[in-house]
Image: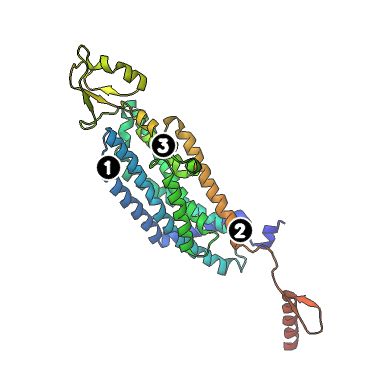
Amino acid sequence: TSVGQEEYAAPLWKQYVIVTKRIFQQHWRSPIYIWSKMVLAVVSSLFIGFSFFKAKNTRQGLQNQMFGFFMYLMIFNPLLEQGLPTFVEQRGLYETRERPSKTFSWKAFIAAQITAEIPWNALVGTAAFFCFYYAVGFYNNASPSGTAAVNQRGAYAWFFNVLFYIYIGTTSHLVMAPLELTESAGNVGYLIFTLGLTFCGVLVSLNKLPGFWKFMYRVSPFTYIVDGFLSNGLANNRVQCSSTELVRFSPPSGYNCAQYMESYITKAGTGYLADPLATENCEFCAISSTNDFLRVVGVSYDRRWRNVGIFIAFIIFNIVGATFLYWLARVPKKADRVKCVKKEGEVNVPQSEYSKSMIDKEDSTIV
């Protein structure tokens, strides 16, 4: 018989199944926690989505779509803080009742806590995705590539969005696992959020960051979700500059707009003329494709699946880190921590054995 089966009434896998089921039942019977997450995600997604409703593919419109997603990521911190009190309540119940009575192992506890959050976060992320993605109009950028591309890129965006919400839940467990107070864990989570969002490449691109801080761009999980989501949402479409974004000039005598700008457009590799054959009042747009805009901000459509893999690695890191930190900070490291009690005139006797001898003596006296 294994050590785990000697210590507990059931094997670890069965403990895990039973505890996970119990947590699901608790959420179902007291749904205020799930509803608060849902309302927060849906309302904020609708607000941001309709703030950038049906953004056009002008230069400003592409900026709006990028900053719309940047603002969408800010839901990270309030959702993280919502999960902290629930975890603390479950942990307090386990550490004061289940652990002393050897009801189930700490491994089953932490694994069940993480697992039970994943389906709910996926559900909340799905609702938020429909409220945000289609309101902003990211799907329109895939329309020139056909219906299949629209569906495939929509499925990719949904999957990455669900991963983002799962990441929020696992980060909540990571910061709360070793700490006692929700306020302390909230501060740590806010620091992670601030550093990650600041250096994700939206506010400042990689080539403009100071050398020391370039590593933050590479270790920030937000870098990879921005790269993956934006490239998927904006790539492979034409840019149509608005009238205020067009550069106007007149070509030299004897030249039309196309002849005068040919060498520049060839060298730059981007840009288009509103009327190439005009001989005066030329109107030039500096970019002609959404891929040109993505290249300027350091995003590439070719890296979209690589970004998914790296982001999943961050989720796994959170799960492993939460388990390790809980074991390190809150799990007793010795099976027998009883102190020795010294009776007068005798050698030190372990407290557990001394207590047992006293109980036996009292029992014999009663008899």
| CA separation in Å, label 3 and label 2 | 36 Å
Q: Which is nearer the eye, 273 or 85?
A: 273
Q: Position of residue 363 (x, y in %)?
A: 73, 84
Report the side of 93 relative to 35 (left or right).
right
Q: Residues within 10 Å of mark 2 (few under 14, many from 20)?
A: some
Q: Position of residue 339 (x, y in %)?
A: 71, 74
Decide: is 208 above or below 167: above
| CA separation in Å, label 2 and label 1 | 45 Å
Q: Nearer the viewer, mark 3 or mark 2?
A: 2
Amino acid type at circle 1 is Phe
In what element is the residue under mark 3? Answer: helix
Which of the numbered marks, if any, corresponds to residue 327?
Answer: 2
In what element is the residue under mark 2? Answer: helix
Q: Is residue 347 visible?
A: yes
| CA separation in Å, label 3 and label 1 | 21 Å
Q: Which is nearer the eye, 197 or 206?
A: 206
Q: Is residue 31 visible?
A: no
Query: Which numbered disc, 3 or 1, marks the residue that appears first in the sequence?
Result: 1
Q: Which is nearer the eye, 100 or 257?
A: 257
